[in-house]
Image (tube, rainbow, N blue to C red):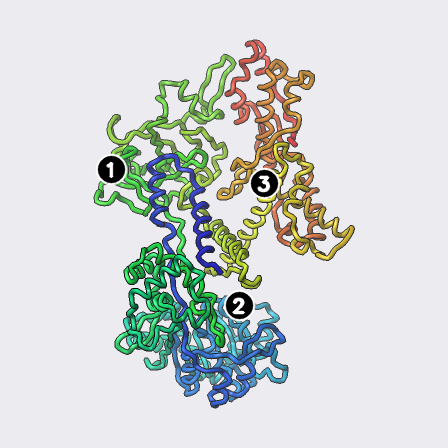
């Protein structure tokens, strides 16, 4: 697998995603952001870490032969792949696993602190199973294993099933186990209460309930009288107040179970923080003793025992790498990577491979000479060290390191079946913060993307965040005017993304496009949105009374954020929140309830779920391109804080993938159709053909033939038509604008040009239309149809209640998720458009177009009244339109 290629593709796509959130207009800000990208501020170079090789501790079979384990452990602990697999070979143990088994056999409590992937769970599962086999307790619980998260308990439940039941005949299943964490249903809980398993898996919250709920205390705690083992997984999570709660819980459990000889076991990968392992053992033993309430000796803190994978030679001096052989190996790996040895034994002796393990993988701890892991390095850091050691260029060293790691990951040990180098890249991705600026003119203002309240070394100069118009990229200072200062002070908002409060607003600063002076009414009217201006019968334009208080106000602001005298400080224009229109591009927002997040972009509001979905999809697509990976291995595992977040992210990702598929198919179908485009009746079939989904991905009966197959195809086509229409709704995805909003999809209307030029089609219409030019009629009609389409005032069956219900029934019969409509999926409604004003309490699925509305004012704005003499204008103004429904197709 080409890990570096996967990483490169991931960073490129994530960078493109975050860069596309906001189109920055100001060249200084764009230059500042480009510098951030160059410095990799939001996605620093990944940390490289080698998974070490653990010293062998023999096999389970050999420990059974030595009498350290019960003979039946030989049958249980084997490599198994499926339910009926009895195991191809016995498990091989690491040295620290063997040490833990030996300590447990002596009856001592202990703590295991080894790295991730070191098999910590076996260090308590094997001893527990051995003890249950040697001293059966048919009606009691012998061990309680406590996990901080249910996900860990679920994972361990699967491991126990694999070892203790897979391939094991019924009569040989001598050790029972069960999970009791709160996620079980009533029947499962009752079964646990009745069965009294040998091993109980739970979490510390449920363990508290077991001690306080009468029935569960009687059945389970009563069955745990004389409890032999208590294991706490992920010991490092129990700290502070939670650690104190768990420590008291352990003591209460010991008393309730009447178990003075209880063996306590803890595991953790991140507790060894001492300078040396000996110092770390003392500190860990002290913490574990306090937590368990029983003495844990430092010698009972078990760490990992590592060994080398590479072979520097018997006469090599540790840490010393001869320059010439190393330089030759670097040149060979960088220029001719195919000449690098691919066999395990040969590559393990290569000077470059030895150097990589010594520098990135292992270090020798003084004074004892114990091998320990090195802290992770970035590849540029490692390349710099290799350049110093070999004398070759940093670029050549960079390529050489990546090459030897790629080859080392494929070179496998013949007997142990492990790679020479198992390495990890730890990549941290940050959405970053928004841009902050000082109250100073363009070109002199301080710019930063790190949250700060003041300009460094200038405590008198505050910093405020910037938001950007989503249409033109013009920046706005996000400020507030505290009431106690009577509007004379401008400050940064405490939470720029929170709903606007009194005094909140924005400052517009522009040298090339300043807001015109209030005395120049013509210039002001040309810059205001069309819906803010009304024109009377005599052609005079005035600002709507409802908008007269929302006009931009010129202000002057000093570097300290205080209002300044005109002509001094920073010249800006104040507009109160919520954001109503862009002073630069005139984009306006009539729905004031729409959050400012949908109008103004910021680099700190990428949408976490969208970012995770994009990262996940990129990784999965990269994995699918890896020919050397099996289908089973091309998967991504993601951890989240809790089940709610996991459910939310899973739903978001499924929706993300579905929308992306439909949009991609639509775009490709249009590209195939060329300039003639696709009519609405041909669209579903074209999208269906472009998707070319295998039947097993969408059909409820994948093997259906003939008529049933045609019904499944028809159902999918109808679903695709609905998805396409639903995705055209305006403004419902902030971070995923649809194809129309991004300019990748353009609509035209059948015969519109011919209708506009045909006088007969306009006979009997309003005088303003019959006397208008054909080109102007076409423009008006197109604008009206666009407005109706964006509002989903379209006449199509699938958007009606009856059509949606029928579609749900058809999809349930013939399709499976995610293509079938979910029973809980809300319907995207078609709307009815009325020529006339709306009434209070009108249905939400209606659109009203009146002379006083935004579209009506737009018509006046573009000057259609100038086409007729004054009497006709007065006649048209005197008419009162009757509301009638209309629709666009």
Q: Mark 3 or 1, which is nearer the eye?
A: 3
Q: Residues within 10 Å of mark 2 (few under 14, many from 20)?
A: some
Where in the figure is residue 401, as x and y percent of width and height?
38, 61
Q: Secondary structure at mark 3?
A: helix
| Residue 235 in sight in this render | no
Mark 3 or mark 1: name the one nearer the start of the chain: 1
* Callout 2: SS: loop
Whether residue 556 appears in this view of the structure is yes
On-image quarter of the C terminus: top right
Which class describes the residues within 10 Å of circle 3: few (<14), some (14-19), or many (20+)? some
First of labels 1, 2 by sequence position = 2
Residue named by callout 1 = 560
* x and y, in percent, of residue 865 in the image: 54, 15
- Write the residue at 63% across / 54% down: 817
Q: Nearer the viewer, mark 1 or mark 2?
A: 1
| Residue labelled with disc 2 | 182
For residue 99, what is the image quadrant? bottom left
Nearest to the observer: residue 204 or residue 522: 522
Query: Disc 3 to disc 2, how far (Cα)?
Result: 47 Å
Disc 3 vs disc 2: which is toward the camera?
Answer: 3
The quadrant where residue 671 appears: top right
Q: Tell me where residue 33 appears, x and y as whole percent.
A: 36, 42
Q: Which residue is mark 3?
A: 667
Residues at discs 3 and 1 in contact (Cβ within 8 Å): no
């Amino acid at each position: 697998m080409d890990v570096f290629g996967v990483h490169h593709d991931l960073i490129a796509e994530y960078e493109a995603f975050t860069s596309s959130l906001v189109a920055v207009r100001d060249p200084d800000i764009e230059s500042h952001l480009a510098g951030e990208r160059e410095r990799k501020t939001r996605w620093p170079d990944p940390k490289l870490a080698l998974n070490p090789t653990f010293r062998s501790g023999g096999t389970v079979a050999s420990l059974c032969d030595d009498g350290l384990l019960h003979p039946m452990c030989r049958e249980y602990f084997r490599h198994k792949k499926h339910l009926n697999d009895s195991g191809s070979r016995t498990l091989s143990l690491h040295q620290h696993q063997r040490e833990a088994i030996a300590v447990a056999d002596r009856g001592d409590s202990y703590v295991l602190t080894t790295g991730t992937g070191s098999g910590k769970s076996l260090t308590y599962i094997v001893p527990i199973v051995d003890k249950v086999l040697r001293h059966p307790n048919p009606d009691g619980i012998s061990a309680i294993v406590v996990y901080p998260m249910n996900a860990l308990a679920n994972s361990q439940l699967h491991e126990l099933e694999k070892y203790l039941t897979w391939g094991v005949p019924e009569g040989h299943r001598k050790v029972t186990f069960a999970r009791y964490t709160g996620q079980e249903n009533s029947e499962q809980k009752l079964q646990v209460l009745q069965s009294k398993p040998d091993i109980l898996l739970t979490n510390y919250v449920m363990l508290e309930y077991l001690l306080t709920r009468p029935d569960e205390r009687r059945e389970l705690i009563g069955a745990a009288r004389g409890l032999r083992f208590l294991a706490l997984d992920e010991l490092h999570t129990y700290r502070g107040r939670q650690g104190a709660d768990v420590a008291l819980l352990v003591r209460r459990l010991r008393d309730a179970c009447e178990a003075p000889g209880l063996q306590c076991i803890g595991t953790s990968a991140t507790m060894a923080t001492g300078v040396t392992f000996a110092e770390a053992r003392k500190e860990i033993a002290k913490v574990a003793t306090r937590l368990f309430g029983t003495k844990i000796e430092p010698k009972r803190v078990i760490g990992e025992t590592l060994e080398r994978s590479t072979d520097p030679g018997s006469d090599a001096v540790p840490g010393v790498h001869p320059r010439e052989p190393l330089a030759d190996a670097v040149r060979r790996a960088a220029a001719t990577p195919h000449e690098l040895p691919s066999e395990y034994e040969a590559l393990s002796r290569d000077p470059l491979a030895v150097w990589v393990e010594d520098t990135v993988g292992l270090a020798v701890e003084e004074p004892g000479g114990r091998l320990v892991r090195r802290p992770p390095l970035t590849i540029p850091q490692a390349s710099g060290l290799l350049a110093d050691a070999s004398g070759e260029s940093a670029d050549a060293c960079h390529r050489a390191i990546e090459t030897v790691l790629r080859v080392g990951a494929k070179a496998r040990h013949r007997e142990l079946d492990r790679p020479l180098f198992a390495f990890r890249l730890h990549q941290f991705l940050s959405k970053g913060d928004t841009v902050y600026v000082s109250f100073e003119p363009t070109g002199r203002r301080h710019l930063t993307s790190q949250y700060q309240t003041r300009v460094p070394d200038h405590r008198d100069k505050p910093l405020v965040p910037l938001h950007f118009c989503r249409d033109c990229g013009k920046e706005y200072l996000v400020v507030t005017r505290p009431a106690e200062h009577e509007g004379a002070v401008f400050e940064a908002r405490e939470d720029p993304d929170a709903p606007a409060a009194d005094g909140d607003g924005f400052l517009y600063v522009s040298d090339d496009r300043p807001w015109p002076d209030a005395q120049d009414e013509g210039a002001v009217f040309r810059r205001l949105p069309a819906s803010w201006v009304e024109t009377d019968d005599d052609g005079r334009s005035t600002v709507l009374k409802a908008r007269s208080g929302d006009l931009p106000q010129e202000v002057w602001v000093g570097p300290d954020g205080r209002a300044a005298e005109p002509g001094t400080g920073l010249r800006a224009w104040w507009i109160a929140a919520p954001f109503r229109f862009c002073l630069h591009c005139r984009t306006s927002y009539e729905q004031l309830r729409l959050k400012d997040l949908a109008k103004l972009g910021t680099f700190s509001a990428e949408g976490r779920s969208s970012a995770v979905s994009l990262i996940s999809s990129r990784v999965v697509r990269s994995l699918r391109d890896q020919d050397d990976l099996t289908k089973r291995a091309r998967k991504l595992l993601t951890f989240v804080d809790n089940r709610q977040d996991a459910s939310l992210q899973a739903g978001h990702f499924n929706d993300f993938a579905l929308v992306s598929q439909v949009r991609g198919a639509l775009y490709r179908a249009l590209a195939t159709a060329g300039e003639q485009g696709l009519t609405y009746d041909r669209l579903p079939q074209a999208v269906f053909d472009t998707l070319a989904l295998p039947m097993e991905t969408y059909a409820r009966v994948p093997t259906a033939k003939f008529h049933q197959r045609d019904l499944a195809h028809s159902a999918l086509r109808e679903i695709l038509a609905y998805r396409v229409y639903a995705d055209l709704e305006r403004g419902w995805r902030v971070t995923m604008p649809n194809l129309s909003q991004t300019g990748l999809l353009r609509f035209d209307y059948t015969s519109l040009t011919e209708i506009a030029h045909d006088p007969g089609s306009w006979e009997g219409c309003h005088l303003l239309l019959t006397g208008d030019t054909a080109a102007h009629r076409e423009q008006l009609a197109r604008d009206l149809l666009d407005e109706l389409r964006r509002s989903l005032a379209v006449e199509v069956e699938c958007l009606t209640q009856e059509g949606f219900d029928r579609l749900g029934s058809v999809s349930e019969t013939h399709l499976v998720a995610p293509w079938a409509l979910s029973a809980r999926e809300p319907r995207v409604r078609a709307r009815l458009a009325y020529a006339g004003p709306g009434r209070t309490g009108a249905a939400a699925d209606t659109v009203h177009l009146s002379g006083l509305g935004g579209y009506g004012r737009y018509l006046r704005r573009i000057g259609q009244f100038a086409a007729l003499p004054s009497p006709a204008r007065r006649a048209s103004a005197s008419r009162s339109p009757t509301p009638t429904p209309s629709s666009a197709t």
